[in-house]
Amino acid sequence: ETERYEFRWFGKSNAKREAFTPTDATLVYDEARSVNPTESENLIIEGENLAVLKLLSNSYREQVKCIYIDPPYNTGKDFIYKDNYTQEKQEYYEESGQVDEEGNRLFQNNESNGRYHSDWLSMMYPRLKLARNLLTDDGVIFISIDDNEVHNLRKICDEVFGEGNFVTEFPRVT
């Protein structure tokens, strides 16, 4: 009677903790790329998404009406964030293209990796958890994804946002 359905993967506990670990990042205003920032209620924010979501959580909790994300599709060819990294090899990572513009380490998640789906889920979970905290009660989130992880994305979204809040999928034919 204590058992119930739950979606588990290796690293989920760490992913949950990561959502609420403080960040030392700061938001920087880009005046050159901003359009009518004082008259508009709409903002475009660019940066490492986990750090940005953590920073926005304090000021914009339950105030965001719409979020759109286009995460890595986990095809084995795209890079995803490796949130726990060491800095001692930073120069090597920069030269080999394993870091983004801000120095955040990226890694290629190949299917031969024994934690192929788990690594992707652990990257997504804290971001979705923080995004949920930003949304208003009638807010929406749109997520672009392909067939590689759509089934896992649906499970993780059901857990974070609630199964009853799912509306539909929009297939795109290319």
Image (tube, helix red, strand yellow):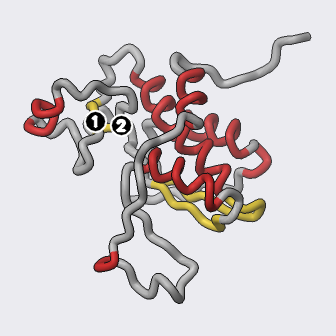
**Pointer 1 residue:** 106
- Using residue 94 as the reference point, say whether residue 58 is left or right of it: right
| Mark 1 secondary-structure assignment | strand
In-front residue for pair 63/80:
63
State left or right for residue 22 relative to residue 48.
Answer: right
Residue neighbourhood size for the residue with mark 2, other residues' Cα within 10 Å, grouped as few (<14), some (14–19), many (≥20): many
Q: CA distance from mark 2 to mark 1?
A: 5 Å
Q: Residue at x 77, y 60 (%)?
A: 137
Q: Residue at x 19, y 24 (%)?
A: 88
Position of residue 108 measured from the top left corner of the image (x, y, whole percent):
27, 31
Pick whichever, 75 or 91, lies toward us. Answer: 91
* Quadrant of image for the N terminus: top right
**Where is 145 relative to 42, above or below?**
above
Residue type, numbered disc 1: Leu
> Residue 136: x, y in percent?
72, 62
Say which quarter of the image contains residue 112. Answer: top left
